[in-house]
């Protein structure tokens, strides 16, 4: 296939994709990796990593023992590889037409890792596999036939797949349905494998993690709806059940000139002993290419691929052993393209070509943080990619255009929350209210009732469906208004329940927020966290002056209070000790950051610890000031509510621990019969352990509440708030997720009803008499009890405290990023580049400016000026790219996951391999959505001479 052939049609792929998805939307529609729904579905990632042998046992179950682990592909010299596909959203579907065109001349397609996101669910294969690649097999599609046909690979081109970590989140059950079993003989879930191996010695912590992971493992869904008939293909123009496609999760594809050795790296990137023995046993004169879910060389770092239970043995050792005749490795998991050329200096130095190819549909991983400088002193540890897609400058320009406007909007949200706090203080002091006539009696509505009513309206408006392609101005405006109202509500809540201390607590909140923001600015200015080899003398003087100013500011409120209240309740010594520790730590850190080499072990240790030290030191000072002020107001118990909350949390943990270990204890008498014990353990797991784990928190808190009332303990009531808030939030998320998954049609109506019911009840609590409906006194009575019911007040206090602390920390992080500079940036207010759907990403930060900024950082820049880049552009870039060293902050660290967009430009790709007796030619097909598909030859891999002679 030539470049011209695909360029003529590539520009139309995005239009076809939109038409297809508008007619036949997917279940996930737009998969977000910061949504609770996605994270809950992926919980088996955490659980699976804690188990010992669960993945290995499941892999052995899915591997056919009676068949060779080979797939013959005799005569095939051209094939396609696409990695990390199944997000089921536009970023996946836009690649499918180009893949289908390329597949017309290919022998097969290999999906490299993560076939289905987020959890490999068997019922997600319709949207994540069949609709984009086998649309001819899906019943009831509404899109026109000419559109559907562009999303159908040729039926005579098989699709093989290697599971990724996300496919393992349902124990590989969905993957087995599609690839490992015939359509007319589907697998069954081997629930008995969840039982542990009781004779395996485990340490205490390992035992607890293993049992908890097995008990709480999220069992997979069974096929439903059109998932089953989608497995039926065609034979002689007649429907026919699809045969088994591959013998196991790991296998070898024997093509004409090379063998593709495909391994399964499970959840944590390791392989087990039997798979390693199989890998080591592969011989023959034919050259090999390793296909792996986890790359061996990625982001400039080597990852050798460990073998579970066998320290010292690695996949890397096998592929670099010349007798095995490997010429290249290709890995997925990282969602971009990286090429390491062994013929280039400082790239691959082991004689192998290394390729990362995970851009087949999932969100794009940024490439600008990858080190590409050849001057890095850690030559033995760092490797420089020779090609990247997206290119480093392209990546920075793109993600800056997504991130910086969001930072600006986030800053506005936090500022509006602060404005709400000020407005709430004014409303509380003025005593604003209005009298209404309801139920033939006067009802006085104060600022609290008005604020709750406003929040109800805003939340209901937020649930209105957003039309595709429409501006997001209204939803974003609603979010800013909700932040403003939340600030008002928090302040009014404080004034209502602590009228005498409200003023002092609000001053404490403002002063603490200001102080940590100044710290954030000083840390960014001094780059205190970043190791350096030399510091100019004047920097020492400047740092000493800044530190002294921060210490004085921390102690200034205590000095102005002249020792606190007259009754001696004020605890000031804690603040003095905290400030002393803060100053000592700042000085020690300033000295420790000066190292012999910034690439040495000492510098690496400082990078790991500096951020934690800085946060702990600032938290100690703020906590000392909080204790001083709150003890002076007689609120010491309220201050200690956080630490006291650890007590019921510890009780809950003990109950969970007992539940986790109960099946082992109850089946110990069957230790001589492992089979019976495993069955009994599984029964106890289902009917005892799982219910106890789920009920541990609510039952413990109910009992805690009852005892606190019985003994009238102020301390127990204070300890109730934090764990109650956590429990309510967790239960709420689980219920919402369950409703969304199991009752999709009822989800939105029930959500609206829930918002209205809770909102009206809170409104009745804030406005006495509002719900006193004649003949229907129950709502009014419930609202009146809610107003004074201490568990509800405790949860509300914990909620508003968490919101206030989160706003302060978030504002400090914004200051650390330099987001305040956007206030003076006129483009933040008027430029369409800050709005979704504006010009291309190059209009925000030019590729030349992005290149200069990245080169300066790669060469060891310290955040100063960059030649040829104006100050405002540099500031925008630094918000998205603080540098190669931490701290990045959660926004930069997860920038790729947060900004997974469903509009062009996309940075997707797949690879085309063409083999001959002497070489393998690798081409990349770049899919952007708003441009023609670009095809470029990126590698010519020479095959060993012995293989040539053999041919």
Image: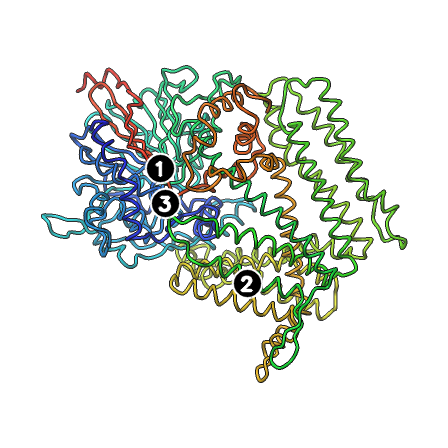
Residue depth check, mark 2 versus mark 3: number of the one nearer the observer: 2
Query: Looking at the picture, how far across and down is residue 772, in whole percent?
Result: 61, 78
**According to the image, label 2 marks what residue?**
456
Picture quarter containing residue 686? bottom left
- Foreground pick, 321 / 696: 696
**According to the image, label 3 marks what residue?**
87
Residue depth check, mark 2 versus mark 1: number of the one nearer the observer: 2
The reply to whether dot 2 and dot 3 touch (C-beta < 8 Å) is no
- Numbered disc 1: secondary structure: helix
Residue depth check, mark 3 versus mark 1: number of the one nearer the observer: 3
Q: Is residue 312 above or below residue 745?
A: above
- Foreground pick, 198 / 736: 736
In the image: residue 498, left or right of residue 194: right
- Residue 197 visible in the snapshot: no
- Foreground pick, 41 / 289: 41
Residue at the extreme bottom? 775
- Numbered disc 3: secondary structure: loop
The reply to whether dot 2 and dot 1 touch (C-beta < 8 Å) is no
Can you say which quadrant of the picture contains the N terminus?
top left
Q: Which badge, 2 or 1, comes first in the chain's sequence?
A: 1
Q: Residue at x 69, y 40 (%)?
A: 516
Task: Kindly identify which numbered label has been placed on residue 460.
Answer: none
**According to the image, label 1 marks what residue?**
274
Q: Which badge, 2 or 3, comes first in the chain's sequence?
A: 3
User: How far apart are labels 3 and 1 at the CA level?
Assistant: 31 Å
Query: Looking at the picture, how far across and down is residue 288, in whole percent?
Result: 28, 26
User: How far apart are labels 2 and 3 at the CA level?
Assistant: 33 Å
């Amino acid at each position: 296939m030539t470049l011209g052939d695909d360029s003529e049609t590539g520009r139309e792929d995005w239009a076809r994709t939109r038409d297809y998805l508008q007619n036949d939307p997917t279940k996930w529609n737009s998969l977000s990796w910061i949504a609770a729904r996605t994270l809950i579905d992926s919980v088996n990632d955490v659980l699976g990593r804690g188990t010992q042998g669960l993945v290995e046992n499941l892999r052995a179950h899915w591997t056919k023992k009676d068949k060779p682990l080979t797939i013959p592909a005799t005569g095939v010299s051209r094939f396609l590889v696409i990695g990390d596909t199944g997000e089921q959203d536009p970023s996946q579907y836009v690649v499918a037409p180009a893949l289908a065109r390329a597949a017309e001349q290919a022998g097969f397609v290999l999906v490299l890792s993560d076939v289905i996101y987020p959890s490999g669910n068997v019922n997600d294969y319709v949207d994540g596999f069949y609709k984009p690649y086998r649309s001819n097999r899906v019943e009831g599609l509404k899109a026109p036939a000419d559109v559907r046909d562009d999303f159908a690979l040729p039926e005579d081109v098989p699709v093989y797949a290697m599971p990724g970590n996300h496919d393992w989140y349902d124990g590989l059950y969905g993957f087995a349905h599609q690839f490992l079993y015939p359509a007319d003989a589907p697998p069954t879930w081997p629930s008995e494998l969840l039982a542990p191996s009781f004779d395996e010695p485990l340490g205490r912590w390992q035992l607890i993690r293993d049992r908890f992971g097995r008990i709480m493992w999220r069992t997979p869904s069974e096929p439903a709806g059109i998932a089953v008939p989608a497995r039926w293909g065609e034979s002689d123009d007649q429907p026919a059940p699809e045969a088994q496609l591959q013998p196991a999760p790991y296998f070898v594809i024997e093509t004409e000139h090379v063998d593709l050795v495909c391994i399964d790296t499970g959840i944590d990137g390791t392989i087990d002993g039997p798979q390693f023995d199989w890998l080591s046993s592969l011989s023959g004169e034919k050259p090999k290419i390793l296909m792996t879910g986890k790359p061996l060389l990625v982001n400039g770092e080597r990852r050798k691929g460990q073998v579970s239970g066998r320290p010292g043995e690695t996949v890397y050792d096998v592929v670099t052993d010349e007798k095995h005749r490997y010429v290249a490795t290709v890995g997925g998991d990282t969602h971009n393209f990286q090429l390491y050329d062994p013929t280039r200096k400082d790239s691959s130095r082991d004689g192998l070509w290394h390729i990362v190819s995970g851009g087949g549909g999932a969100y794009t991983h940024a490439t600008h943080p990858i080190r590409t400088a050849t001057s890095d002193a850690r030559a033995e540890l760092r490797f420089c990619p020779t090609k990247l897609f997206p290119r480093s400058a392209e990546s920075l320009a793109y993600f800056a255009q997504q991130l910086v406007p969001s930072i600006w909007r986030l800053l506005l949200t936090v500022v509006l929350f602060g404005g709400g706090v000020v407005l709430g203080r004014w409303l509380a002091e003025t005593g604003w209210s209005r009298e209404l006539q309801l139920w033939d009696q006067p009802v006085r509505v104060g600022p609290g009732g008005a604020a709750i009513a406003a929040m109800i309206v805003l939340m209901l408006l937020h649930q209105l469906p957003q039309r595709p392609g429409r501006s997001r101005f209204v939803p974003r405006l609603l979010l800013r208004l909700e932040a403003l109202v939340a600030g008002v509500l928090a302040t009014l809540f404080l004034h209502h329940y602590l009228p005498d201390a409200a003023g002092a607590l609000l001053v404490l909140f403002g002063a603490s927020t200001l102080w940590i923001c100044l710290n954030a600015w000083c840390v960014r200015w001094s780059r205190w966290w970043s190791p350096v080899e030399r510091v100019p003398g004047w920097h020492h003087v400047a740092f000493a002056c800044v530190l002294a100013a921060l210490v004085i500011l921390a102690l200034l409120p205590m000095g102005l209070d002249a020792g606190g209240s007259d009754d001696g309740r004020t605890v000031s010594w804690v603040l003095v000790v905290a400030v002393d520790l803060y100053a000592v730590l700042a000085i020690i850190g300033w000295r420790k950051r000066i190292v012999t080499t910034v690439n040495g072990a000492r510098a690496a240790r400082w990078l790991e610890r500096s951020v934690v030290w800085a946060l702990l030191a600032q938290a100690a000072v703020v906590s000392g000031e909080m204790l001083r002020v709150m003890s002076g107001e007689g609120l010491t118990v309220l201050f200690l509510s956080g630490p006291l909350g650890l007590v019921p949390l510890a009780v809950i943990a003990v109950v969970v621990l007992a539940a986790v270990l109960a099946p082992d204890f109850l089946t110990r008498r069957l230790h001589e019969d492992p089979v019976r014990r495993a069955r009994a353990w599984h029964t106890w797991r289902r009917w005892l352990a799982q219910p106890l784990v789920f009920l541990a928190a609510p039952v413990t808190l109910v009992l805690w509440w009852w005892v606190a009332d019985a003994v009238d303990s102020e301390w127990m009531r204070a300890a109730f708030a934090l764990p109650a808030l956590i429990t309510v939030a967790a239960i709420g998320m689980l219920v919402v997720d369950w409703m969304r998954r199991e009752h999709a049609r009822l989800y939105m109506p029930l959500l609206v009803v829930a918002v209205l019911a809770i909102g009206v009840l809170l409104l009745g609590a804030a406005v006495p008499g509002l719900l006193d409906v004649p003949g229907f006194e129950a709502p009014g009575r419930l609202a009146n009890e809610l107003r004074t019911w201490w568990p509800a007040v405790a949860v509300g206090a914990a909620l508003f405290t968490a919101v206030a602390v989160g706003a302060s920390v978030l504002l400090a992080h914004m200051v650390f990023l330099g987001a305040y500079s956007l206030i003076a940036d006129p483009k933040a207010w008027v430029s369409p580049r800050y709005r979704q759907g504006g010009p291309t990403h190059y209009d925000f930060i030019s590729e030349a400016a992005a290149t200069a900024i990245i080169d300066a950082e790669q060469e060891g820049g310290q955040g100063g000026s960059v030649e040829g880049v104006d100050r405002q552009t540099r500031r925008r870039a630094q918000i998205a790219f603080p540098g190669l060293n931490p701290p990045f902050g959660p926004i930069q660290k997860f920038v790729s996951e947060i900004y997974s967009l469903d509009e062009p430009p996309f940075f997707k790709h797949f690879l085309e391999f063409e083999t001959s007796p002497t070489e393998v030619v690798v081409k990349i097909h770049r899919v952007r959505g708003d441009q023609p598909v670009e095809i470029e030859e990126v590698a010519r891999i020479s095959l060993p001479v012995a293989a040539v002679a053999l041919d």
